[in-house]
Image (cartoon, rainbow, N blue to C red):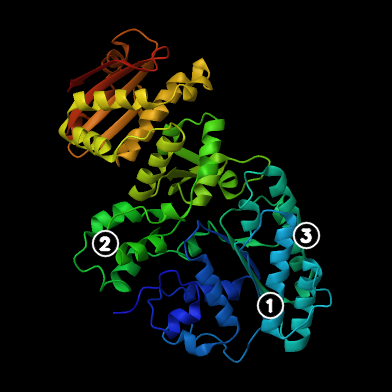
Amino acid sequence: MKKLPIGIQTFSKIREEGYIYVDKTQEAFDLVNNFTYVFLSRPRRFGKSLFLDTLKELFEGNKKLFEGLYIYDKWNWDEKYPVIKISWAGDLQTLESVKQVAIDIFKLNQENLGISCDNTTDPGSCFRDLIHKAYKKYGKKVIILIDEYDKPILDVIENVEQAKINREFLRGLYSIIKDNDAYIRFAFLTGVSKFSKASIFSGLNMLTDISLNPKYGNICGYTQRDIETSFKDYFVDVDMDKVKRWYNGYNFLKDNLYNPFDILQFISNEFLFRNYWFETGTPSFLIKLIKERNYFLPNLTNLTLDDKILSSFDIENIDLEVILFQSGYITIEKVIQNPRGIGYKLKIPNLEVQISLNDYILRYLFNYREANDIQNQSYDAFYNGDLDVIRDNLKTLFSSIPYTNYTNNELKLYEGFYASVIYAYLMSLGLDLISEDVTNKGRIDLTVFVSDKIYVIEFKVDGKTGEALEQIKEKRYYEKYLNDDKEIYLVGIELSSEEKNIVNFEWKRV
């Protein structure tokens, strides 16, 4: 049984020491033969660094590492190229520290290439020197590989002014690539975020963005076939349907994918279902944006964005939904063709992200600190149709929210605020929901699907007693699901902005 490549992003180590390697060399072969300047955006921990290192070994002509892989008998191993590799890591909080990291990076490249920069204290000058001198020394055009190109910006994204300063430095540094086109064979940049061409990419308008090119949809990540072949010895007695629900579901217009980090951690932790990927990064900046913009959380179950919006964002005008997508908290469900071009219907990828993200929102946006056993009790109550328990636990939820969480919400936003709280709570339970569920009679506020039961829920704030349930019955929202052969519960939830809690909770089984 081959070893698991946990935390290993070095292609040579994986191949030389017998670790599992999911072959991505067909995509690599296609890329280098069809493009000169390529950009790829993927969420963190998705295998970008390993793919980039694979390209490095390929261009350096290390043939033995590729035995048995797709590219082995298709590549000209006699041609070897000088490679400049930039991988951002360390203190990137100030311009001075970013420059120092760049100087250190170029120092390492000088050592690897056997070249000395004329000016070792200026990153831009040294980068230019490396390209020119490598071309002259090796008689071959240069390969440039940049990993996490956006890290100096994302590390300070909450400090807009510093982010703009770091962005300007990077724009100048990366523009050197364009200025030296005559000396470059291939350049590949990876990152989490795609900034608009008007900002960091203004000097790199020749880049081909393959992030949403269906042909390269599987360039990072594991497919179901990968799990069933490369990892088959590990998944002998594992509930694969549950594994899919928990960790599968990322989509970049080809197959549904697993985040490699999740799969490797899941196996190494004796197949315990936990939030492995989510724990590696705290979405505090996203929570801050959600709070500042009074974002209506139920939108996340029924979200559509157009192609241009989804592909990029600017520091000065950050789109929350775009960051959620680029960071991996939502993903593509399907492509929508509309009169003005292409749009995408988005979804939360899997149960891990659904539960973890909404738990985090409850804790840090609404200061909810309820014990897990209460949430487990709520989960069971939905399965058993025990509406009294659901009512009591929701009341406890609102009672636990500090008064200060309400004071920054305008009166007109109260219904959205309450709906967001309930949505986040139910999503944290791992339930399947649809917000603004469309029927031929109107929109259901929230529909919950649990085993053999469907809950049709309507919210009202500061209304007449009985108004919420009456609206469901009057507009016959439930008719949409009458042929599903499931128990249907109509639930009216009425809240008071004065009491800041549920004042009427009534239900009827159809």
CA–CA distance between discs 3 and 1? 19 Å
Relative vertical location of residue 224 with respect to residue 435 in this rendering, above or below = below
**Around disc 1, counting alpha carbons within 10 Å, would you say few (fewer than 14), some (14 to 19), or many (20 or more)?**
some
Q: Which element is circle 2 on?
A: loop
Percent across and percent down for residue 236 are 21, 69
Residue 141: x percent and y percent?
Answer: 71, 81
Q: Which residue is mark 3?
A: 172
| 398 horizontally vs 137: left or right | left
Q: Residue at x 35, y 20 (%)?
A: 459
Which badge, 3 or 1, is on the more N-terminal residue?
1
The residue singled out by tag 1 in the image is 109
Residue 60 point in image, percent of width and height:
60, 84
Toward which corner of the image does residue 489 lie, by quadrant? top left
Q: Is residue 39 above or below residue 433?
A: below
- The residue sitting at the bottom extreme is 78
Residue that sits furthest to the right in the current view:
118
Amino acid type assigned to the residue bearing label 3 in the image: Gly
Q: Is residue 291 visible?
A: yes
Q: Amino acid at mark 1?
A: Asn
Q: Is residue 198 above or below residue 217?
A: above
Which numbered disc, 3 or 2, marks the residue that appears first in the sequence?
3
Left or right position of 121 against 449: right
Say which amino acid is labelled 2: Phe
Q: Where is mark 2, residue-wise?
A: 271
Give me the residue at 54% from left, 87% from top.
62
Q: CA distance from mark 2 to mark 1?
A: 41 Å
Q: Which residue corresponds to the image point at 32% horizontal and 53% vertical from the top-left? A: 274
Kindly indicate whether the residue at mark 1 contacts the one at mark 3 (C-beta within 8 angstroms). no
Secondary structure at badge 1 equals helix
Q: CA distance from mark 3 to mark 2?
A: 47 Å
Q: How many numbered marks does the figure carry?
A: 3
